[in-house]
Image (tube, helix red, strand yellow):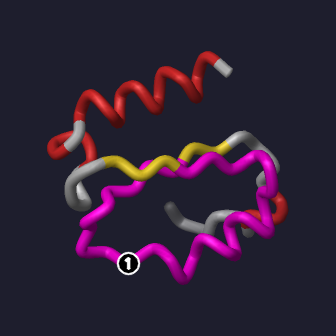
Amino acid sequence: MASPPPPFERVRVPTLLVLGERSYLPYDHLLDAHRAALGNLLEVVVVPGGHSVLWDALEETSAAIRRFLAA
């Protein structure tokens, strides 16, 4: 927490991004940069609900995480 994280271009690990379809936090402006940096290492899943995906869509979120970890 004392230093900024490395840029996405340097962190080449499989990454799951779970977004709520009605989140009050817009993320669209960051997706292109994440896709460009991570390519096929990035998986984006949109689930029903708002920003609190575990609260709003527990089953869908946990299923996405299970699939991601099993891959």
Q: Quadrant of the C terminus?
A: top right
Q: Quadrant of residue 14?
A: top right
- Left-right relation of 47 to 5: left
Residue 56 coordinates in the image, percent (x, y):
17, 45
| As drawn, 55 above or below 63 | below
- Left-right relation of 29 to 47: right
Magenta span covers which residues?
17-44
Return the residue at label 1. Answer: 26
Q: Residues within 10 Å of mark 1 (few under 14, many from 20)?
A: few
Q: Is residue 58 magenta?
A: no
Q: Residue at x 45, y 74 (%)?
A: 27
Seen from this angle, which residue lies furthest left? 55
Q: Residue at x 21, y 60 (%)?
A: 50
Seen from this angle, which residue lies furthest top? 70
Q: Residue at x 56, y 51 (%)?
A: 44
Residue 68 coordinates in the image, percent (x, y):
58, 29
- Left-right relation of 55 to 35: left
Q: Amino acid at mark 1?
A: Pro
Q: Residue at x 54, y 83 (%)?
A: 29
**Mark 1 residue element:** loop
So how many labels did they put on this image?
1
Q: Is residue 36 magenta?
A: yes
Residue 51 coordinates in the image, percent (x, y):
25, 60
